[in-house]
């Protein structure tokens, strides 16, 4: 499982996914279906996300199944941005649809 902070046109959000990469075709398709066609993604270490989100993290993880491979952990961009220092985030992964 991966935890990613996505910077999109409407602001940051944090997601959990079982997919390998933010730019895998199935991931891009799911994001596109949600209206996200352009983003910058940063991986967040799972243990750090667990620590920052506490019980909410566990609730979201319990709802994450093989058939449901993408969950929004935090759609409040202000809170998501505030919870993590920039140097805690992984390398930027940029994606811009065709």
Image (cartoon, rainbow, N blue to C red):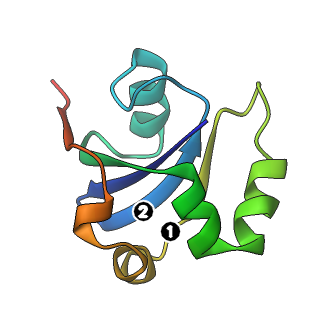
Q: Dot 2: within a 10 Å radius of its alpha carbon, few (fewer than 14), some, or many (20 or more) residues?
A: many
Position of residue 75 measured from the top left corner of the image (x, y, whole percent): 50, 68
User: Is residue 76 shown above or below 96?
Assistant: below
- What is the x, y in percent for residue 86? 24, 67
Q: Estimate the spatial distance between the alpha carbons at disc 1 and disc 2, rounded to whole Å.
A: 5 Å
Q: Residue 33, how many percent across, how many down?
A: 47, 36
The one of 4 and 49 positioned closer to us in this rendering = 49
The image shows residue 98 at horizontal and vertical percentages of: 15, 23
Examine the rendered structure and indicate whether residue 39 appears above or below residue 1. below
Q: Secondary structure at mark 1?
A: loop
Is there a contact, CB below 8 Å, between mark 1 and mark 2?
yes
User: Does residue 10 sit above or below 90 in this rendering?
Assistant: below
- Residue drawn at x 47%, y 45% as measured from the top left: 34
Mark seen at residue 13: 2
Residue located at (39% from left, 19% from top) = 24
| 60 horizontally vs 16: left or right | right
Give the camera-side residue of 45 and 56. Answer: 45
Q: Is disc 2 placed on a helix, strand or loop?
A: strand
Residue sitting at the far top:
25
* Quarter-of-image position of residue 97: top left
Badge 1 or badge 2: first in the primary sequence: 2
Q: Is residue 17 left or right of residue 94?
A: right
Q: Which residue bears the numbered disc 1?
A: 75
């Amino acid at each position: 499982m991966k935890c990613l902070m996505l910077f999109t046109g409407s602001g940051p959000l944090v997601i959990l996914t079982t997919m390998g990469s933010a730019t895998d075709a199935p991931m891009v398709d799911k994001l596109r279906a949600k209206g996200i066609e352009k983003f910058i993604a940063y991986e967040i270490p799972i243990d750090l996300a667990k620590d920052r989100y506490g019980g909410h993290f566990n609730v979201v993880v319990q709802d994450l199944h093989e058939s449901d491979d993408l969950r929004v952990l935090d759609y409040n961009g202000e809170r998501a941005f505030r919870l993590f220092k920039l140097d805690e985030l992984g390398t930027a992964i940029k994606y811009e649809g065709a």
